[in-house]
Image (cartoon, rainbow, N blue to C red):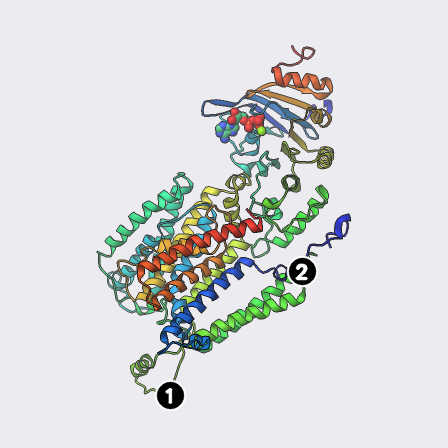
Amino acid sequence: MTMASAAAPLVELRNISISFGGIRAVDNVSVDLFPGEVVGLLGHNGAGKSTLIKCLSGAYHPDAGEIWINGKKVAINNPRDARAFNIETIYQTLALADNLDAASNLFLGRELVSSFGFVDDAGMEAETRKILARLNPNFRKFKEPVSALSGGQRQSVAIARAVYFNAKILIMDEPTAALGPHETQMVGELIQELKRQGLGIFLIDHDIHQVKQMCDRAAVMKNGQLVGIVKVADVTEDDLLGMIILGKKPAHLAG
Amino acid sequence: MTDTAQSRSAEKPRRSILDTMEIDSRLMGMLGVLVLISLAFQIWTGIRALDTFSWNPFAWLVNGKFLSTQNTYNLAIQTVSIAIMATGMVFIIVTRNIDLAVGSLLALCSGVMAMMQTEILPHWLGLGLGSPLIMPIAVICGMFTGMVIGAFQGWLVGYQGIPSFVVTLGGLLVWSKVAYEIVGGQTIGPLDPTFLMLGGTNGTIGSTASWVLGAVVAVLTVWGIWASRRSKAGHGFQVKPAWAEVFLSLVSVGMIMGIVAQINAYLIPPARLQKMFTERGETMPEGYTQAFGLPISVILLAVVALVMTVVANKTRFGRYVFATGGNPDAAALSGIDTKWLTVKVFALMGVLTAISAAVASARLTNHSLDIGTLDELRVIAAAVIGGTALAGGFGTIYGAVLGALIMQSLQSGMGMVNVDAPYQNIVVGVVLVLAVWLDIVYRKRAGKK
Ligand SMILES: Nc1ncnc2c1ncn2[C@@H]1O[C@H](COP(=O)(O)OP(=O)(O)O)[C@@H](O)[C@H]1O
Ligand SMILES: [Mg+2]
């Protein structure tokens, strides 16, 4: 951490707030992320984790706050802007078009085109086969619409889409929710590999044990507010659980 | 080649012949329905044509009138207008919208084109009646009208969030009145002679050109089948067995040339032929016959269907249309501007409506006040019978064209056997509901949705 903190953070979310109707879904939250770092986002359902990262991915426009990337203030008005900053997102809902096949989903919005400007389906399928062979070697259903896939297979497609396009900043919103133990382990290995390649990763996960293993720091949210950011090495799993439930930093770190 | 590495490669699922040839079972079903309808009306008209009833099915088929060259020719011409709009309605419905205004918009575009060619261009702008410039300018003005109004409706739906059902229901009422006003509440005609070529028998290319065109299309189709095979093989994907490709090529060529043969078998009626010779100051040789050949309107439909199929399957725009229909949120999160897409889809529908308006008014040789009435229902029915899912996300262009042909066949057949109009409506209504029900059953079976 010490060597990383010398440089400007990859991402800085500063004082982000956003409301829906009367509800303050995210209330003045600031989090940063360095290259080669995994920051876990923890909190109860409805704490505002997904909403916060959707401000970074361009799905929502925050009511207040700033987004800084590589030391520069940026405007992210839509998902295309986020993609232009090499921000890739695995959404909690996966955001797949059920009626299209894996390749069409993987390249949605960024289709490979031939010289005539026609979409190159064969080329996209070939690329999809390559990346999925790495992520999920049992994946076979390349021709079917993704509605015909199992939860784990769908998740593989969403993960493949996020890592295919050379992301620098990766947002993973409960990426292992539908996966079995073996696939979950593979995603863990993938995260470690991407981290070694220097990506910054926001990881939302309910499994505290997993967060403790995979993350460098953890940011805990409650009712839209930031409880605190801690280095996972400094806390126990019980400390993290306490932060989530009580909304307070553990005594030995407070103050 | 993909299943070499894995352990469980042993059992390979057995595949049916249709699967092996990768033929869409829905396409086969629709063609089957079309054949059934044709045979039923052929037999029905055949029995009616006999002086004394006979039990000989051969006599029924031979004496039937439904599959006569004249009737199939008329059927083709009558289907064009609805079928062109149905291809656009596929995109509308796939994006989870509906367009109830196409009939009224057709009337408006037809009115604009009629006024352009009978008043504005020849008199106000002084081109003179019969100028060859009138047809293209009038059609372009009609298409522009359709595009602008379609885009406006799309803007209300996409950017203002008003449900398309409401917007286009309003459009249905508004545009028909506007159409009435701009033509001064009168039938406008006769239309420009060049313009009439878009309608049917007044614009045909003759038998020789039809054969040549058919042959060219057949060659391109076969080339397409094999080019796609080569591309797949080039990426190392599994391809169907060569016999399946050969069979498919033969069937395609047979169908294309069969259609041309049926069209070319319809001869210009002798009285009309006589008149053509007299107009040219010649005398008609004894026993002379001549075929109409393919109507320009039918060629226009083929071109529209081809272009729309390519747009649907091979362009980003088409991909986004289907993605938006399948999951609008996912499409938006993938950076697709779904609002602007809605505007484009409705504008495209407007342009296609204008093309249909040109075909429809040219076929009637004038702009009548009731043109386009109830067309929205026929167009939606054609798209839905053709397998377009009202829930969005699924639909094919060929399905919509076949749907239009099935609807027109039913109507034309019932007319031939003197079914009264109210009963015709009952049949069409039942067929529509039945088609949607079959589609739901089919999707459940296929496990697609
Ligand atoms: N699009 C939306 N419209 C209205 N309320 C929303 C919307 N998105 C999120 N919320 C609300 O914001 C709060 C935070 O939700 P969310 O970010 O999904 O929580 P988490 O991901 O931490 O479980 C919840 O109260 C939720 O109901
Ligand atoms: Mg969430």
Is residue B82 depicted above or below A203 in this figure? below
Find residue A149 and report its horizontal and vertical position in percent: 63, 44
The mark nearer the N terminus, 1 or 2, is 2
Identify the secondary structure beneath mark 1: loop
Closest to the observer: B401 or A214?
B401
Q: Is residue B312 visible?
A: yes
Q: Position of residue A39 (x, y in %)?
A: 66, 26
Circle on res. B287: 1
Amino acid at the residue labelled 1: Gly
Choose top left, top right, bottom left or bottom right for residue B379.
bottom left
- Chain identity of mark 1: B
Q: Amino acid at mark 2?
A: Val
Whether disc 1's CB lies below 8 Å from ligand 1 is answered no
- Dot 2 corresponds to which residue? B239
The one nearer the camera, B321 or B432, is B432
Residue B6 at least partly seen: no
Residue B281, compared with residue B390, is above or below; it is below
Q: Residue at x 57, y 69 (%)?
A: B251
Quadrant location of residue B81?
bottom left
Q: Nearer the viewer, residue A113 or B349?
A: B349
Out of A33 and A52, give the one closest to the viewer: A52
Q: Residue at x 78, y 48 (%)?
A: B7
Q: Quadrant of ligand 2?
A: top right
Alpha carbons under labels 1 and 2: distance apart? 53 Å
Direction from residue A148 to residue B196 in the image, left or right: left
Indicate the chain on which mark 2 is placed.
Answer: B
Label 2 Cα neighbours within 10 Å, binned few <14 / some 14-19 / many ≥20: some
Q: Is residue A17 left or right of residue B267?
A: right
Mark 2 and mark 1 in contact (Cβ < 8 Å)? no
- Percent across and percent down for residue A207 are 67, 26
SS at badge 2: loop
